[in-house]
């Protein structure tokens, strides 16, 4: 489906306290990973309304990652990550029913020290999305 | 007589309930008929499309169009009505956001036809007779033009410019009457407004609202087939996924008064841009479980989640262009 030049666009919503710190750590540690991600920092994964994720897809994201602190107890705000877990467990089921491939959305728990996990998640997702191809093949575009 | 405002009614892909809703104005419809001339209403009056074509542009004061656009004929007639009308009102959930027929956008056109004409259990069609998609059929040697089914259902405002929206499945007589009065008042609200309904959520007018705690927390989702809900306690507290918190009010809580949860036919509140996304957000937040397995088990009790949270708004959702009906 996709040609060799296809580069997927991935929008990441990362919580300030864990995942964003891990992204920072990966940077300061000079870890190499694909440049396909656009990271948006939010204070807590519990703040990420599913409407944000839907808007990312609407505006052309091929994949979206929502990432926060490990449940049950790493959340800086006590239970924001649990709220994200409930919302995005529902959301994943919704995407499935609407025929959107499950590889296009990931909910990940990445702590401030897990730069390695961050790099692994990005690598896996880029690989999955390159295999799937763009989310929308425009009519008339080969 | 000619000085009275001209009004047209038209139906696209709809069930006919919105036409009933107009008639449900009961004796008030006589007041409407005294104030306006109805010049086109296929379900009730014998005017032809050619009568509309003969009118000068802008001759119709307001066209009330219900149903989503699914046939080439719908597309043709609504474009004609737009040309001839000063105001176009999307009347009812289907015209506003696609409604229940919009749920078919999850499937490709061929799948929809296969289901409707072959695999439904009440259908016997061994020869697989399908509607003509060429736009023409031969009957006894005569060529007859027939409408084509479009690849997906479009809400009205994706086909023509829409001035106002009247929500509901169908809009209640009160909402319809309110909307007519707004239009006749001469003080028109901003283009694109929802008219006739409330700007606050259904919970705000719900008779059970006083029994709704500050934080609703439930351990399980239930369905109306599972039990008879108590008539005097918030249905969310009883475990039913009632969509009142994210749905526009104005219906008078009809379903709640019949002990049924809100399914969202009045559509999103003004500050919600994706109804289903917001519904998922609040349903997730009231489910008081912490273990992923348990959460998944509870969610599995809701069959057809997409049909629950997007019952009337799928064709208007953020993902509308990424559904299978739109993808190659």
Image (cartoon, coloured by chain):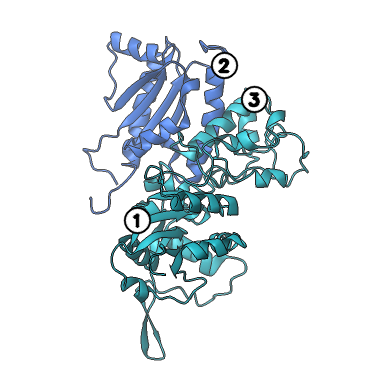
Chain colours: A blue, B cyan
Q: Is B323 rendered above or below residue B291?
A: below
Q: Is A59 rendered above or below residue A107?
A: below
Quadrant containing the N terminus of chain B is bottom left
What residue is pinned by disc 2?
A: A79
Relative to the observer, which residue lies in front, B38 or B223? B38
Instruction: Find residue B159 and name its label.
Output: 1
Q: Chain of mark 3?
A: B
> Dot 2, how many residues are within 10 Å of its Cα: few (below 14), some (14-19), or many (20+)?
some
Mark 2 or mark 1: which is in front? 1
Relative to the observer, which residue lies in front, B322 or B314? B314
Relative to the observer, which residue lies in front, B34 or B166? B34
Q: Residue at x 39, y 56 (%)?
A: B88
Secondary structure at badge 1 equals loop
Estimate the x, y position of residue A50 in percent, counting from the top left: 47, 31
The Cα–Cα distance between marks 2 and 1, rounded to whole angstroms, is: 44 Å
Where is residue B213, by image quadrant?
Answer: top right
Q: Chain of mark 2?
A: A
Q: Chain of mark 1?
A: B
Estimate the x, y position of residue B95 in percent, counting from the top left: 45, 55
What residue is pinned by disc 3?
A: B289
């Amino acid at each position: 489906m996709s040609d060799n030049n296809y580069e997927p666009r991935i929008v990441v919503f990362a919580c300030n306290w864990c995942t964003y710190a891990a992204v920072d750590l990966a940077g300061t540690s000079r870890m190499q990973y694909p440049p396909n991600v656009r990271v948006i920092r939010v204070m807590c994964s519990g703040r990420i309304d599913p409407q944000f994720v839907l808007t990312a897809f609407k505006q052309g994201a091929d994949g979206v990652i929502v990432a926060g602190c490990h449940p049950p107890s790493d959340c800086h705000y006590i239970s924001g990550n649990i709220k994200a877990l409930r919302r995005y467990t529902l959301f994943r089921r919704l995407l499935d029913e609407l025929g959107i491939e499950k590889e296009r959305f990931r909910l990940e728990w990445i702590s401030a020290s897990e730069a390695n996990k961050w790099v692994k998640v990005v690598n896996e997702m880029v690989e999955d999305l390159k295999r799937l191809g763009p989310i929308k093949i425009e009519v008339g575009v080969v | 007589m000619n000085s009275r405002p001209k009004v047209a009614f038209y139906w696209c892909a709809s069930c006919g309930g919105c036409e009933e809703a107009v008639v449900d104005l009961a004796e008030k419809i006589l007041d409407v008929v005294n104030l306006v001339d109805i010049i086109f209403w296929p379900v009730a009056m014998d005017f032809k499309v050619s009568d509309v074509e003969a009118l000068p542009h802008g001759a119709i004061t307001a066209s009330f169009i219900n149903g989503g656009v699914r046939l080439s004929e719908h597309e043709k007639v609504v474009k004609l009505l737009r040309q001839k009308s000063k105001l176009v009102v999307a009347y009812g959930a289907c015209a506003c956001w696609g409604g229940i027929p919009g749920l078919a956008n999850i499937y490709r056109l061929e799948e929809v036809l296969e289901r409707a004409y072959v695999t439904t259990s009440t259908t016997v069609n061994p020869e697989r007779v399908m509607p003509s998609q060429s736009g023409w059929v031969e009957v006894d040697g005569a060529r007859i033009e027939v409408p084509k089914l479009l690849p997906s259902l479009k809400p009205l405002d994706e086909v023509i410019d829409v001035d106002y929206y009247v929500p509901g499945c169908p809009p209640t007589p009160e909402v319809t009457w309110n909307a007519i009065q707004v239009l006749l008042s001469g003080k028109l609200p901003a283009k694109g407004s929802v008219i006739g309904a409330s700007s606050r959520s259904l919970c705000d007018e719900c008779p059970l609202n006083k029994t709704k705690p500050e934080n609703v927390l439930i351990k399980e989702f239930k369905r109306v087939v599972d039990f008879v809900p108590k008539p005097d306690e918030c249905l969310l507290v009883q475990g039913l996924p009632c969509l009142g918190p994210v749905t526009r009010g104005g219906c008078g809580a009809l379903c709640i008064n019949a002990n049924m949860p809100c399914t969202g036919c009045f559509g999103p509140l003004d500050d919600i841009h994706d109804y289903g996304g917001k519904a998922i957000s609040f349903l997730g937040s009231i489910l008081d479980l912490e273990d992923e397995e348990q959460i998944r088990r509870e969610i599995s009790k809701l069959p057809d989640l997409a049909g629950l949270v997007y019952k009337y708004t799928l064709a208007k959702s953020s993902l509308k262009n990424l559904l299978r009906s739109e993808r190659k």
